[in-house]
Amino acid sequence: MDTSPPSDQPMPPDGPKVIPASTLVIFRTSAEGPPELLMVQRAKEMRFAGGAAVFPGGRVDDADRELARAILPDEPIEIAAGRIAAIRETLEETGLMVATHAPVTAAEAAEARRMLLEDGRLAPVLDHFGWQLAPERLAFFAHWCPPWEGAFDTRFFVIDLGTGAVDVQVDATENTRLFWASAAEALAMADRGEISVIFPTRRNLERLAGFACHAEALSDIASHPVRRIHPRIEIRDGAEWLTIPADRGYPVDGQPRATAQRG
């Protein structure tokens, strides 16, 4: 029986003290194969997932919540603030401005990123450019939270950029590299030792590899309502495995603990 709190709610007071965070999986249509996803390689010095390849994202801050209340007053604040944080962190880490009603030029995105890095808040950037957000374009995909103190309580969203090249540039502080790859390619890179991926990223890449397009991802999301995933240890064939519930839409529900990178 699943006893985890609903994904539109914060961790309850009697649960571990966790850090709300948000991540964005960005789809780009490929001309010759499955969609490509934007990934960032974390600096080795970072406390969380140092050196690993992850999707853009980071912690939800108070300014994200304030903006979320103004833009999405009818949505549960944990989901709404997660959407805002995902948009803000993507701009900070990659220079890519997503989910605006009006098109954004590369020059505008670069200036917006500069402003954001100076101030830390997305709202003044939106006011300066007169941009209106369409945060509903971010589909709520998954929710992961290790059951221990200080863990990141991370909501995953997906968005589709469609076709065409976009300008991205690594921030060179938290991250060292940006790259586009299909989910299957990213998994192959990890298997060859070219990148490292933490346990949640591998499970999500395995799930994403089954989608031929963004529409298939949305269909899968609709058939698997999001619930918090608390990875846990269980014994399989005499060995410790790190596992997740088998009913969350993931084709692989665990791996030996000794091989799992946990961030």
Image: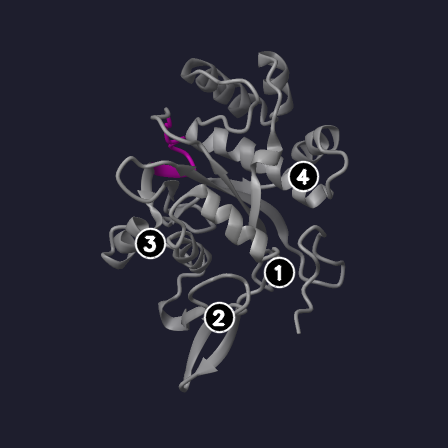
Which is more N-terminal, label 1 or label 2? 1
Q: Are marks 1 and 3 in contact (CB under 8 Å)?
A: no
Image location of residue 87, percent across then percent down: 55, 33
**Counting other residues with Cα less than 10 Å from the Cα at mark 2, is it few (<14), some (14-19), or many (20 or more)?**
many
Is the residue under label 1 in contact with that under label 2 (CB below 8 Å)? no
The first of marks 4 and 3 along the sequence is 4
Query: In the rendered image, is residue 159 in sight?
Result: yes
Q: Label 4: which residue?
A: 80
Residue 37 appears at what percent x and percent y? 38, 41
Estimate the spatial distance between the alpha carbons at disc 2 and disc 1, rounded to whole Å: 19 Å
User: Nearer the viewer's eye, disc 4 or disc 1?
Assistant: 4
Distance between the alpha carbons at the discs numbered 1 and 3: 24 Å
Q: Say what amino acid the circle numbered 4 marks.
A: Ala
Magenta: main secondary structure? loop
Q: Nearer the viewer, mark 2 or mark 1?
A: 2
Numbered label attached to residue 243:
2
Say what secondary structure mark 3 lies in.
loop
Amino acid type assigned to the residue bearing label 1 in the image:
Glu
The mark found on residue 196 in the picture is: 3
Q: Amino acid at mark 2?
A: Thr
Q: Which residues are magenta?
A: 168-177
Q: CA distance from mark 3 to mark 2?
A: 19 Å
Q: Is residue 148 above or below residue 62?
A: below
